Amino acid sequence: MEIPMKSNRPWESWEFRWFGVFRRNTPFEAKRFPAVPPVTSFIDPMWSYPYRDRLLHYLSNAAIGAKVWRLVEAPCLVCGCSLDATIFRWDGIWFWPDSLSHYVATHDVRLPDEMVASIEARSFEPPVAVDPPPLDTLPWPPALWPASRTRSKLLQKIQEFFSFAAPV
Ligand SMILES: [Zn+2]
């Protein structure tokens, strides 16, 4: 499934409840990872959000929604530094890789408006007790969740999806 980029402000129309999965803005990766947006499309140096530090705290302190033990290389797509590809955060509504805070803090990646509103509605306090994420019913791109897959397979696919490190 191709992610529709309806405007040059894709944070206004992000329709999923996962975020933080990016690809490089190259034709090769566009073909290989059609379900994810290029990181450059979410970089907005003009985002003058007044509570960015509180957002970052939230992103790094929400519950761990999934942890994958298989180690993979996950370089930052902008600066190349090594990012954690094993921890995924979850707040009962949104699911994101732990590495998302790096993109926001270092590269001006802008969060979807709905994600920001959801975090603001909680006064930037990650909920302490949340049910595990319904990994099989979150609106993943269909390629990620064929009905026959087991949960462990799904976790593996999610990690590949988030890190791009595994062979297709
Ligand atoms: Zn970086």
Image (cartoon, rainbow, N blue to C red):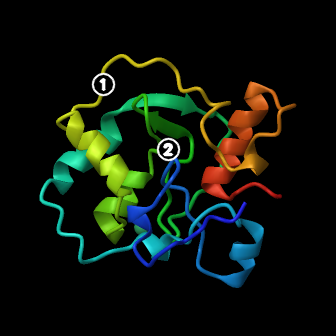
**Residue pointed to by mark 2:** 17
Q: Is residue 78 visible?
A: no
132, 85: nearer the viewer: 132
Q: Name above or below for residue 63 compared with residue 27.
A: above
Q: Is residue 115 left or right of residue 142?
A: left
Quadrant containing the N terminus is bottom right
- Which amino acid does the dot numbered 1 rest on? Pro
Q: Name above or below for residue 53 compared with residue 138.
A: below
Image-quadrant location for residue 154: top right
Q: Is residue 58 visible?
A: yes
142, 22: nearer the viewer: 142
- Which amino acid does the dot numbered 2 rest on? Arg
Quadrant containing the C terminus is bottom right
Q: Tag 2: Cα neighbours inside 10 Å, few (<14), some, or many (≥20)?
A: some
Query: Quick one: label 1 or label 2, which is nearer the N terminus?
Result: 2
Q: Residue at x 60, y 36 (%)?
A: 138
Q: Nearer the viewer, mark 1 or mark 2?
A: 2
**Residue pointed to by mark 1:** 127
Is disc 1 placed on a helix, strand or loop?
loop
> In the drawing, what numbered circle is on residue 49?
none
